[in-house]
Amino acid sequence: MASVAEQSALTNTIKSWPERVKTFYNDVRTEMKKVTAPSFKEIQATTVVVIITVFLFGLYFGVVDWVLSNSLERFYKHFTH
């Protein structure tokens, strides 16, 4: 059985929800007014950077994969013959 103090605390919490939701909603609206969308040039620039980065990482991991696979292949051939 819950004590009177616990019931009072629960009641106060439930009663404060509408005010807390209203405050949260107002805070979100205030912050969203500060948000700006990037310009088309900014989008183009970041897209180019992402595409170049993806290709560079792909090339890097391709070279690392090739080096490791050749090294392991030679290692296995060396110890199996």
Image (cartoon, grey):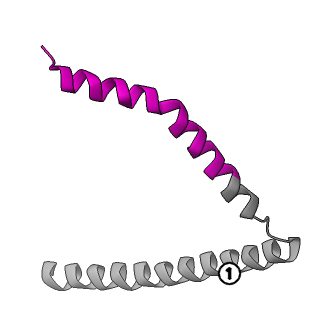
* Side of 58 where 12 appears, left or right: left
Residue appearing at x 28%, y 29% in the figure: 9
- Counting from the top left corner in percent of width and height, residue 2 is at 16, 18
Within 10 angstroms of label 1, few (less than 14), some, or many (20 or more) residues? few
Q: Quadrant of residue 76?
A: bottom left
Residue appearing at x 54%, y 31% in the figure: 18
- Counting from the top left corner in percent of width and height, residue 20 is at 51, 39
Quadrant including the C terminus: bottom left
Q: Nearer the viewer, residue 62 or 14?
A: 14
Residue appearing at x 50%, y 84% in the figure: 60
- Counting from the top left corner in percent of width and height, residue 35 is at 73, 63
Q: Nearer the viewer, residue 67 or 8?
A: 8
Q: Which residues are magenta?
A: 1-29
Q: Residue furthest right?
A: 40
Residue appearing at x 42%, y 83% in the figure: 64
Q: Is residue 14 above or below residue 50?
A: above
Label the magenta part by its dominant secondary structure: helix
Q: Is residue 6 above or below residue 27?
A: above
Would you say residue 66 sits in the magenta stretch?
no
Q: Is residue 1 above or below residue 63?
A: above
Mark 1 lies on residue: 52
- Counting from the top left corner in percent of width and height, residue 26 is at 65, 47
Q: Quadrant of residue 23?
A: top right
Q: Quadrant of residue 72?
A: bottom left
Q: Secondary structure at mark 1?
A: helix
Quadrant including the N terminus: top left
* Side of 21 where 35 appears, left or right: right
Q: Amino acid at mark 1?
A: Ile
Would you say residue 8 sits in the magenta stretch?
yes
